[in-house]
Amino acid sequence: MAKLGPGQGLGCEAAVGSLVPSRKREYKACNKLTEGKRPLYAIGFNFLDVRYYDVFATVGGNRVTTYSCLKDGNFAILQAYVDEDKDESFYTLSWACDLDGTPLLVAAGSNGIIRVINCATEKLLKSFVGHGDSINEIRTQALKPSLIISASKDESVRLWNIHTGICILIFSGAGGHRNEVLSVDFHPSDIYRIASCGMDNTVKIWSMKEFWPYVEQSFTWTDLPSKFPTKYVQFPVLVAVVHSNYVDCTRWLGDFVLSKSVDNEIVLWEPKTKEQSPGEGSIDILQKYPVPECDIWFIKFSCDFHFNQLAIGNREGKVYVWEVQSSPPVLTARLTNPHCKSAIRQTAVSFDGSTILACSEDGSIWRWDEVDHPSMKS
């Protein structure tokens, strides 16, 4: 279990951000769209294809919907996929692409089946069955966007090749999570490394380096996916206890990790792993980003492409925008709308940070645009 590192003594306390907005970037409430009465649990822009940076998707109930963010502040609905299972409740989505560059949407939720949707044909391309319970989050490997990871209530994380339909690795077992896995993320530059977190109050750092030949093999596999020699990764390289309650969102910031629990703050910390001694290591808490009234679980934060702006909602319908790489952290803006009073489950920040979206418990999408941003004037 990773403990605090030697740099956490007196005078080395974490830098805590002030809740007074800097107003460096100002945003105005632009629009609201209500999809229906079922909660929207996830929203996300497509950062994988420069042609579609203004396209985002939402999931709620058994529906996956894609939209375009118009420059006049409005939305244009592009397409909708409705799952055949009326009882499905999608909790997560991730953009991916096929080997030929075709944009794909990957969604999953309560029934534990991963749906891969072809955005060109608007049809279901593939379904992946493997998890034994609901799926809480899916992320795409930006360096190889045919690879996705899924975090499940069955206490495991799985690595999939969406091109071949193969489950390559299962992160579970002796050193795995001891309760629901709520969030997972690929390292932005170290292709072998992932982070996961969950209801056992831990964040685990895993390495795929030893198993990478199986990842490569998954791209050339011609037999049935069920016959692939799926491998178990049982031991993480680091188990970090940063929070004292459920950890429901984690993202890499370079080699650092951002994570949040139900204690009204996001924490930035540095994992210090020992390659020669997996499982041993330490953590340094670097910064804390306060988020008032954020004490319920399954609220996810998001960042723009370059990780300059971080946006997170709370249970009262407010969104806090942090300048994530400033030290100490700087609160850019606190976004409100007099009609937005339902819990914000997830945010989406556009490529350059000029548009911030939020999806809420009451089935609505909310939009704020930066005032006087160059892209908004054209």
Image: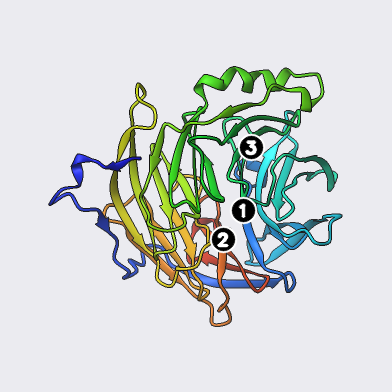
Residue 302 or residue 265, whichever sits in front: 265
Q: Is residue 302 visible?
A: no
Q: Which mark is residue 332?
A: none
Q: Residue at x 52, y 31 (%)?
A: 234
Q: Which residue is mark 1?
A: 44
Left or right, residue 223 beside residue 245 = right
Disc 2: which residue: 346
Q: CA distance from mark 2 to mark 3?
A: 20 Å
Q: Residue at x 64, y 66 (%)?
A: 72
Quadrant of the rendering where the N terminus is positioned: top left
Mark 1 or mark 2, which is nearer the start of the sequence?
1
Q: Amino acid at mark 1?
A: Gly
Q: Nearer the viewer, residue 81 or 271?
A: 271
Label 3 CA crowd tier, 10 Å (few <14, some 14–19, many 20+): many
Q: What's the residue type where badge 3 is placed?
A: Ile
Q: Is residue 248 above or below residue 39?
A: above
Quarter of the figure with the C terminus: bottom right
Residue 179 picture location, percent across and down:
54, 50
Give the image location of residue 38, x and y in percent: 72, 70
Place of residue 170 in the rendered image (x, y in percent of width and height, measured from the top left): 61, 33
Secondary element under disc 2, as helix, strand or loop, is strand
174 left or right of 99 in image: left
Q: How far apart, in angstroms, are the residues tagged by discs 3 and 1?
A: 15 Å
Q: Height in image: 320 above or below 9?
A: below
Counting other residues with Cα less than 10 Å from the Cα at mark 2, is it few (<14), some (14-19), or many (20 or more)?
Answer: many
Marking on residue 148: 3
The percent position of residue 44, horizontal first and vertical second, equals 62, 53
Residue name at image x 48 percent, y 36 percent? 175
What is the crowding at mark 1: few (fewer than 14 residues within 10 Å), some, or many (at least 20)?
many
Badge 1 element: strand
